[in-house]
């Protein structure tokens, strides 16, 4: 790998992805160009069968790569592939000028997902307008109160933890135990600190989700207990935002562009000291997804709460760190 590509990936690799799978792959292509695809081993076929989250993540990575290229004064632009759903997502090709962006490499590095407690308070109108403007028409943005969505999150969590296939996929990306001696620490997935778990909660979750324990405890109401443990996530006065699709059928390129807009939205919020917490399980469950879409009057692509975290969130691991 060239030094320039390594520098671009180190910065762009801070892009968000479901379960911190970091599915993107980039290789040199042509003179000063790069081809974007994804690693099939880093898909979530059970939790994300439509690849909605996959293409949102690849879109966010695309935006991050272009921001990184501007910071390094490498003039690039993106061209979407003719069939992104078959793996040839995009090419970054030589441009006359650097990508115009208000964001910096430092802001890419500083953005955090915060899953812990937030200071009560709703998102101010001017900042909501600024976050919506950052989407640049790639998607819409709806704002609602946390308490209104709390029952839907509870139901979606119960559904997630009651489904053995979903739990098996989640377990694959949980990093709740230290790496064995002599082996490097995990550079992907979800650690206990990144999930805002205490050491006790981390050990407990690791124990109850082990295959043998899960099979027994699932019959005894484990799903309800785990959902109850996270019930406080939305039971305070705060804001939830929903990224909504443009009208009409939503294809891969639409999702890619919406992912680019979503990262710009999150960077805008972070610039003002706000963090985000993805709650995609609410739209992964068919019944609660229908409730959300009836509430917002559009197809929902992403759901996340936003606010000022009580404590500084932990920086999640990345392969490119």
Image (cartoon, grey):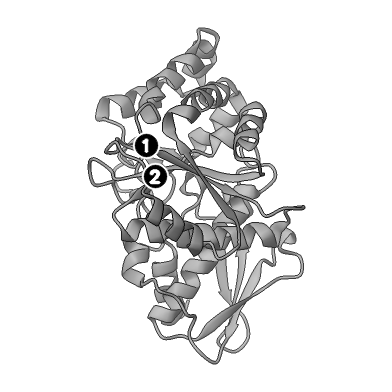
**Residue 208 at x, y = what percent?**
43, 20
Which residue is at 46% across, 85% downward? 74
Q: On the image, which quarter does residue 145 sit in?
A: top left
* Count of numbered circles in the view: 2
Q: Is residue 213 above or below residue 49?
A: above
Relative to residue 181, is residue 51 drawn left or right?
Answer: right
Q: Is residue 112 above or below residue 89?
A: above
Q: Earlier in the sequence, mark 2 or mark 1?
A: 1
C-alpha distance separating marks 2 and 1: 8 Å
- Which quadrant does the C terminus fall into? bottom left
Task: Report the front residue among 105 and 257.
Answer: 257
Mark 1 sits on what residue? 238
**Residue 31 at x, y = what percent?**
59, 89
Could you tell me which secondary element the residue under label 2 belongs to? strand
- Name, please, the residue furthest toward the bottom: 96
Characterize the local packing of mark 1: few (<14), some (14-19) or many (20 or more) Cα atoms within 10 angstroms: many
Look at the numbered discs 2 and 1 and tell me whether their residues touch, using CB distance below 8 Å: yes
Could you tell me which secondary element the residue under label 1 belongs to? loop
Observer-side mark, 2 or 1, equals 1
Which residue is at 26% across, 30% downward? 198
Q: Which mark is residue 23?
A: none
Task: Report the front residue among 77 and 10.
Answer: 77
Q: On the image, which quarter does residue 219 sit in?
A: top right
Q: Which mark is residue 306?
A: 2
**Residue 68 at x, y = what percent?**
42, 74
Q: Is residue 298 visible?
A: yes
Which residue is at 28% across, 47% downward? 314
Q: Is residue 38 visible?
A: no
């Amino acid at each position: 790998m060239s030094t320039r590509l390594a520098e671009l990936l180190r910065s762009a690799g801070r892009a968000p992805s479901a379960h911190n799978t970091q599915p993107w792959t980039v290789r040199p292509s042509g003179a000063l160009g790069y081809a974007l695809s994804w690693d099939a081993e880093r898909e979530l076929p059970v939790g994300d069968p439509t690849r909605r989250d996959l293409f949102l993540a690849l879109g966010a990575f695309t935006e991050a790569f272009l921001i990184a290229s501007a910071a390094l004064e490498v003039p690039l632009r993106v061209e979407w592939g003719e069939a992104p759903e078959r793996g040839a997502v995009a090419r970054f090709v030589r441009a006359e000028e650097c990508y115009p962006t208000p964001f910096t490499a430092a802001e890419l590095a500083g953005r955090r997902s915060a899953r812990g407690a937030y200071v009560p308070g709703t998102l101010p109108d001017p900042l909501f307008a600024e976050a919506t403007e950052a989407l640049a028409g790639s998607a819409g943005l709806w704002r609602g109160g946390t308490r209104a969505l709390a029952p839907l999150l509870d139901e979606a969590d119960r559904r997630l933890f009651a489904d053995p296939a979903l739990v098996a996929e989640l377990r694959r990306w949980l990093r709740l135990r230290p790496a064995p001696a002599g082996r490097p620490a995990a550079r992907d997935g979800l650690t206990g600190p990144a999930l805002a778990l205490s050491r006790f909660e981390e050990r407990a979750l690791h124990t109850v989700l082990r295959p043998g324990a899960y099979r027994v405890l699932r019959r005894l109401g484990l799903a309800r207990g785990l959902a109850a443990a996270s019930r406080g996530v939305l039971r305070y006065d705060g804001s939830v935002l929903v990224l909504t699709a443009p009208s009409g059928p939503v294809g891969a390129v639409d999702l890619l562009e919406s992912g680019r807009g979503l990262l710009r939205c999150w960077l805008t919020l972070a610039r003002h000291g706000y963090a985000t917490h993805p709650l995609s399980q609410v739209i992964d469950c068919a019944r609660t997804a229908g409730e959300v879409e009836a509430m917002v009057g559009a197809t929902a692509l992403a759901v996340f709460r936003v606010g000022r975290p009580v404590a500084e969130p932990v920086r999640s691991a990345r392969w490119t760190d």
